[in-house]
Amino acid sequence: MAGLVNNLLILLLLFQNICLGFRSPLSVFKRYKDTTRSLSSECLGSEQPVISLGLSDFALDIRMPGVTPKQSDTYLCMSVRLPVDDEAYVVDFKPHASMDTVHHMLLFGCNEPSSTENYWDCDEGTCRDKSNILYAWARNAPPTRLPKGVGFRVGGETGGRYFVLQVHYGDISAFRDKHKDCSGVTLHLTHQKQPLIAGMYLMMSVNTVIPPGEKVVDADIACHYKRFPMHLFAYRVHTHRLGKVVSGYRVRNGQWTLIGRQSPQLPQAFYPVEHPVDVSYDDILAARCVFSGEGRTTETHIGGTANDEMCNFYIMYYMEAKHAVSYMTCTQNANPEMFRNIPQEANIPVPIKSDMLKMTHGHHEETKDSDTSSLLQQAKKEEEEILDQDFHIEEAVEWPGLDLKLGQVSGLALDPENNLVIFHRGDHVWDENSFDSKFVYQQRGLGPIEQNTILVLNPSNAKLLHSTGKSLFYLPHGLSIDKNGNYWVTDVALHQVFKLGTEGKEPLLTLGVALQPGSDKNHFCQPTDVAVDPITGSIYVSDGYCNSRIIQFSPDGLYVMQWGEESSLGRARPGQFHIPHSLALIPDFSQLCVADRENGRIQCFRLETGEFTREIKHKSFGRELFAVSYVPGGLLFAVNGMPYPGEAEPVQGFVMNFSTGEIIDFFIPLRKSFEMPHDIVASEDRTVFVGDVHARAVWKFASTEKVEHRSVKKAGIEVQEIKESEAVAEVRLKNKPESTHSLKDADKQPLVQQASSTGVSFVLITTLLIIPVVVLLAILIFIRWRKTTVYGGNSDEEHKLDSSSGRILGRLRGKGGGGINLGNFFASHKGYSRKGFDRLSTEGSDQEKDEDDGTDSEEECSASPPPPTPSSS
C-alpha cells in the first residue's frame, strides 16, 4: 500500500501544479522565472510586476528592489527586461515616489544594462550600449502624459530589450529608520499598433565656456531639421547650478515659435508644450541656455562633474509610424547670426519661489503630506479608469435627431463646444434644372432660402440651440468651423465661400463673385468645402464640381497658391481630381486630405507646399467617396456613395488608421438606410454624425467601447482595483465559460494577450482533468492488485517506488524556485550612454555625461531629405 500512497501523492501534486497554472493568468511568463529579483516584502506590488489589463494591454511595474541608500546624493540603478518578444507600445507612465525620499527618477531604454545585479551604483553606468531617456520625474513636477494614439515603440525587431531605472536619493534623512525604498514607475503597454510613435530630440551645447564673474553668458544651439514632420508635445531643460533659464524654439521663415521655456533650478521633469508646435523639413530648431559666472574664480566648462556645467533642451515628439525615428540630437550652432533675432524672453530669468527652490534642493516643507496625498488621490483616480481599447461604431438608435424635418443636408461640423451644426438647403433642391451647361445657376427667381439654413443642435438630445443663415444662400454645400467658432460655408449656386460669425447675419469675409463661375484667382466654380488651419489661419477651398483644384488663401482672404488638375483618362494620377468634394485638415501632420469623390479615393497633401504625400484607396470604397473627417490621435472617418448598377460594394461608413490607411471598422445605420451620405464629422470620443442629402436626415453613431470605473470586463476576464497604494490592477479569472470563437481569437493574440484570455471556466477545466486522473488511478490499482495476486509482496519493489517518488518530488520542489524575468526597451543613441546622469550634490540636478560628444548628431541634423514625391500641380 505504501507504493500506492506514493503514486497517489505524486498524482495529486501534479494535479495541483496544473490547476495552479490555470489559476494564474501570469503563468504564461514562466519562461522568465529563472531570474526573479528578490524584493523586500515592504515593496507593494513587487510580487506581480506584470499585470494583464485585457486582451492586448498589460502593465509593467518597475521598482527599486527594497534599497536603503547609505549617503546623500546616491544614484542607484536597476533594470527590467520586457516580458514579451513581439512589438509593444508604452502609452502611459505612472510614477510611484515620494518627495520625502526621492529627488528624481529617470527611465532609460537600451539593449544591454551596465550590470546584471538586482541594483547597482549608477557610477558603473546605465547601459553598455546606446541609451535614451524615456521618462523623468522630479519633486513636485507633473507626470508626463502621452497624447492619445501616441506610444513609445518597444520590443520586436527594432525595439530594445531593457528598461533601466535610475533613482537619485538626495537627502537621505528620511531613511533614519532604515526602511527599504521601492520607488519606481508603472508602464502601461499595449500590443495595439499606435498610429503615432513617440521619440526624443536632444539639443545640447558641447563647447560653452563661462568666464569667472561674467554676469550673462549665452549658450546657443541650432540645427536644420531634415526629416519627415514631427509634432512636439513635451520638453525638459537641464543645467547645473549656474543656469538661469533655458528656452527652445522652432524657426520657420524667420519667425520664432516658442516650444518651451523654464528655469533649470525648478524640478527637471518633462513639461507639456502649451501650444501645438509642428516641425517640418528645413525648419530650424534653436535653443539658448543663459548662465551666470558670478561667484566663480575660474572658467567653467561643459562637463560631467558638479563643478562643470551642462546646457540641454529635451523635446518629446511624435511622428507618423512609418517615418518614425526614436532619437535625434543636435550639438552645433548652424547659424549664429540668427540669434540676433531671438525673442527677448529667452534672456529673462524665470522667477522661482523659495519653497519651490527648497523642494528642488531636497528640503522638506510642512505641505509635503498634503501634496503627497493629492498625488496619491490623483493616481488612484487615474488607475480606476481603465479603458478598453477595442471599439465598434454603431448607430445611437435612441438619438431623436433622425426625425428632424430638414432640407437636403449638405454639410456637418462640430463647434468648439462640441455642438452639432447642420447646413441644409431648406426648400431648395439641387436637380437637373439647377444649372446650365456653363454652370450658371438657373433658378435665381426663387430667391435665397427663406429658412434658417444653419442649425445648432445639442449632440445628446438633438435639441435646437440656435439657428441662423436665413435669406443668405441659394444652394448650400460645405461647412466647417474654425477654432474661434466662425462658420465657413460654400454655396454652389453663388460660386462663393463665406465666413460667418455665430449670429450669421452678415458675412465677415466673402471669396468669389456672386453667381459667376470661373477658374481664375478671384472666381470659383461650384466650390465644395473649406478648411481653416488652426495654427496659421490659412484658408483652403476645394473647387469643385467644375474645377479640379485646391486653393489656399491667407487668413484675410488673399490668394496664395493652388494645386490640382482634372483627372486624365485611365487611372487618375496623384494631384488629379474628379470632384474634390470634402476636406479634412490634419494638424497633427500638417496635411490636408481630400475626398476625391468620383475617383473613389482620399488624397493627402502638405499644407505648406501642396505636395502630394499619400493616397488611401480601398475596393470597399466603390467608385465614389463623398466625405472625410479626421480625429486627433490618428483616426480617419469617411462615407462612400451608392454602388453603380451591377456593383456590389454597399454604401457605408469607414473608420481608418490614418498612419497606415487600413480600415479598422465599417458602420451602417439601423434605422432607415443611407441613400446619399454627403458629409461626415467625428469627435475625439468617436461619436460620428452623417448627413444624407437624399434622405434629408442626420444619423448619430457612437463607439460601443465600454468605459467602466473600477472594473473592465472582456472575454471572461475581470480587471479589478486592488490596494490603494498600488498603481496596477489585479487580473482574476471568472468562473464563466467562454465561447469557442473567443478562444480561437485569443489563440491568435501575442504572448501577453494569452495571459489574459484564459476565459475557460475553472470548474470545466477541473472536471476535464479529474477524468484522466480517475482512469489512471483505476489502472494503478488494477496493476497493484495483479502484482500482489500473481507475484506476492516485494519489499524491493516498494523501495524502488519510494526512491522514484522522492526524485520526482525533489524535481517538483526544484521548480518552485526562481521567478519571472521581465522587461525591455528600444536602443537609442551613442550619446549619453556611459553613465546616464552622474552624481551631483543635492544643490545640483540630474547630470548627464557623454564621452562620444555628439558626432552622431551631425548625421541626424544633416540627414538626406525624404524621398521626392510626384508633383501635385
Image: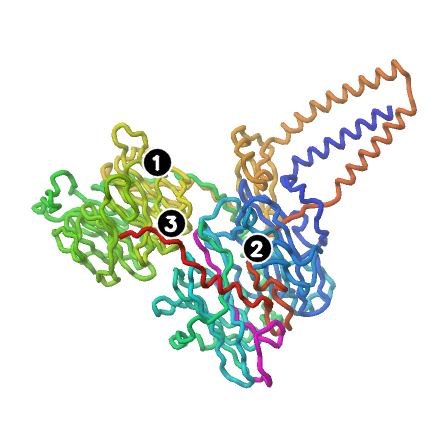
Residue at 35% of width from left, 69% of height from top? 255
Tell me which label, 2 or 3, sits earlier in the chain.
3
Residue that appears at 54% across and 40% down: 55
In the current view of this chain or complex, which residue is farthest to the left? Answer: 445
Secondary structure at numbered mark 3: strand
The correct choice, above or below, for 422 with respect to 73 in the image is: above
Q: Amino acid at mark 2?
A: Ala
Q: Nearer the viewer, mark 3 or mark 1?
A: 1
- In space, the residues marked 2 and 3 are separated at their CA atoms by 31 Å
Going from the N terminus, do you reach mark 3 or mark 1 first? 1
Question: Is disc 1 placed on a helix, strand or loop?
Answer: helix
Res 419 visible: no
Q: Which one is nearer the viewer's eye here, 426 or 158?
A: 158
Residue under label 3, please give it: 631
x then y, percent, for residue 374? 55, 60
**Range drawn in magenta:** 294-320
Badge 2 or badge 1: first in the primary sequence: 1
**Which residue is denoted by mark 1 in the rendering?**
619
The vertical placement of 36 against 12, above or below, is below
109 and 686: which is toward the camera: 109
Q: How far is mark 3 from mark 1, CA to CA?
A: 23 Å
Residue 597 coordinates in the image, percent (x, y):
26, 42
Check whether the beta carbons of the residues at disc 2 and disc 3 lie within 8 A of each other.
no
Q: Which residue is mark 2?
A: 827
Q: Secondary structure at mark 2?
A: loop
Mark 3 Cα within 10 Å, few/some/many (few <14, many 20+)? many
Q: Residue at x 14, y 55 (%)?
A: 513
Please state if 137 lies on the left or on the right of 45 as rendered: left
Q: Residues within 10 Å of mark 1 (few under 14, many from 20)?
A: few
